[in-house]
Amino acid sequence: MEIHHVVRMLFSCLVDADYLDTEQFMDETSSRMRESYSSIVDLKERLDRYIGRFSSSAPSVVNRLRSEVQRMCEERSAMTPGVFELTVPTGGGKTVASVVWAVNHACRHGKQRIIIAIPFTSIIMQTAQVLREIFGSENVIEHHSVMSDEMINERTRLAAENWDAPIVVTTNVQLFESMFSNRPSKCRKLHSLANSVVILDEAQSLPRSFMQPVADAISTYTRVFGTSFLLCTATQPLISGCHKGCGPVEYRGIDAGDIRCITDRSMDLHERLRRVDMRFDMCELTSDEIARRIEGHRRVLCIVNTRGIASEIYGRLRESDDNFHLSRMMCPLHIRQCLSEIRRQLDDGGDRCVRVVATQLVEAGVDLDFPVVYRQMAGLDSLLQAAGRCNREGLLENGVTHVFRMQGYMPRGTIKESIYAMEELLRMHPDADWFDPDVIKEYYALLYKRTPTFDSQEICRLSETPGEVRYEEIARRFRLIDDEGMTLVVNYADAGSLISRLKRVGPSRALMRELGQFTVSVTRRQFEEMRRAGMLDEPLSGIYYVEDPMLYDCKSGLKAGNEYLEQTFVI
């Protein structure tokens, strides 16, 4: 199983050496830009100063516990390289704690860089901003699809080509699809993973349908290339051991003895960080009933499973500037602006109303703090992530997260398996402590039993025979995010001027990156319906623009088809 990763690693070394030698000969200015980064030792000094600033302030109970987790991470960083778990309940400061562990581990064992992979673009820039505050913007490189043009300069562009920087912030898609690619541009960076530290943030978000090849890759990079991995989450999935799936399917995870925990069960983090009561409503509620419950609170967050349901409930609220909608029917720039305004109003010293209806995009890593949260029934991992937006800073004695069922809702795809596993767990243990790590493990065991495949694209079969590895086929099949949908550019902010520039001068990397700030994805069926209705312009072959400004709402995003867009499209 290792040979195809070894071949790609050799290919990476060859490709990058060829590019760098050519660059040194043809472009000495660019070549010199690659040499001016701080060392890992220097980064540790910056991190220590950053941590020291906060430890000197008057600590809350939550902040004292966060400091305790950070100290544990520093102590455990001395452990020999390998695969590690950092399981900290939501709100326990695991992002900074994971970096504390990674920097100290890199210093102690001579690792060359730290790569932080994040599943959601909605939180990647938030994390990168924290890292820039700690280590300086010159040492932190972002590599993802929604970077704005002002974030890119020649130096960061060069570093993104081969990840030749001390701190790299990227996406799971970029990381793992590069590991299984056959293209020089993607494989070029792979040798930078060797002798490095990789943090997999929100590890519970790794798609189950790719868990087998991902686990095999982690094992190979650890054993063969000296990479240390840290799986960081509030709800640690069962990555190690062998687990029974649906029918004859099995998941052969990383050897249990090869994964070491950073935090001890004796720390009792789930109890000490308990700030929320989770209450289950056994009745099925309509969108009108949910809207009325939301309007009964001044500050409340409601999280649902689909974009259609979010639009439905939001539309039932009485119109107010205090109501917010968040879903992938909004383009990335719109989402960031909306989150910024929500945080501003929440931080307002007054008691201003803030009511938010959102999809799962706010669950993992988005720093919002509400006294009350409503969450549509989902898997336990999602329910706990939602609860993490409730009384996040522990300013109240207790917050409340209400779990409700939606009338007429029929779950589909992977979320169906998660809901059924949670319903089974609820029947078995109606009074369980849902924050208990043992309960979380039992949930994942039930979920895995319902999982039809851990390698949906048969990546392992295509790579198991040395000399017959089908590199091109593997690269084509390994897609962490299903790309069956279609991407549209919407008429929001200055998207229109960018489309005019595209028509006038044609595409460029910088222009296409800027247009990425104004995109919304829809299913192919939705796309065809919109095209037949004459809603789409095609300024360049393969680029579709929703030109009519009436089809994009400044509060809820793309509204062309709230009447007919599929109501069960999950983000």
Image (tube, grey):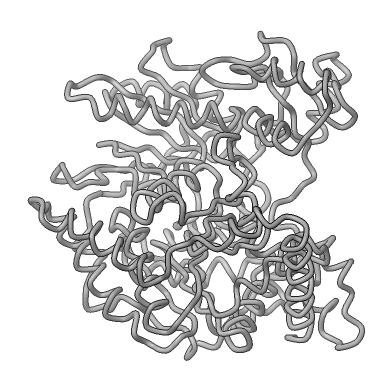
- Left or right of 489? Residue 113 is left
- Looking at the picture, tell me which residue is in the foreground, 482 or 49: 49
- Looking at the picture, tell me which residue is in the foreground, 512 or 179: 512
Q: x and y percent of residue 204 in the render?
A: 51, 62
- Looking at the picture, tell me which residue is in the foreground, 348 or 504: 504
- In the current view of this chain or complex, which residue is farthest to the left? 58
Image label count: 0
Residue at figure coordinates x 63%, y 49% from the top left = 157
Q: x and y percent of residue 301 in the render?
A: 37, 33
Q: Quadrant of residue 243?
A: bottom right
Image quarter of the N terminus: bottom right
Q: x and y percent of residue 436 in the render?
A: 32, 67
Q: Quadrant of residue 73?
A: bottom left
- Left or right of 270? Residue 560 is right
Residue 432 makes an appearance in the image? no
Residue at figure coordinates x 54%, y 39% from the top left = 151
- Left or right of 465? Residue 256 is left
Residue at figure coordinates x 30%, y 43% from the top left = 390
- Looking at the picture, tell me which residue is in the foreground, 58 or 138: 138
Q: Please, is residue 205 above or below residue 130 in the view?
A: below
Residue 447 makes an appearance in the image? yes
Image quarter of the C terminus: top right
Q: Please, is residue 556 above or below residue 365 in the view?
A: above
Q: Quadrant of residue 402?
A: top left
Residue at figure coordinates x 51%, y 30% from the top left = 335
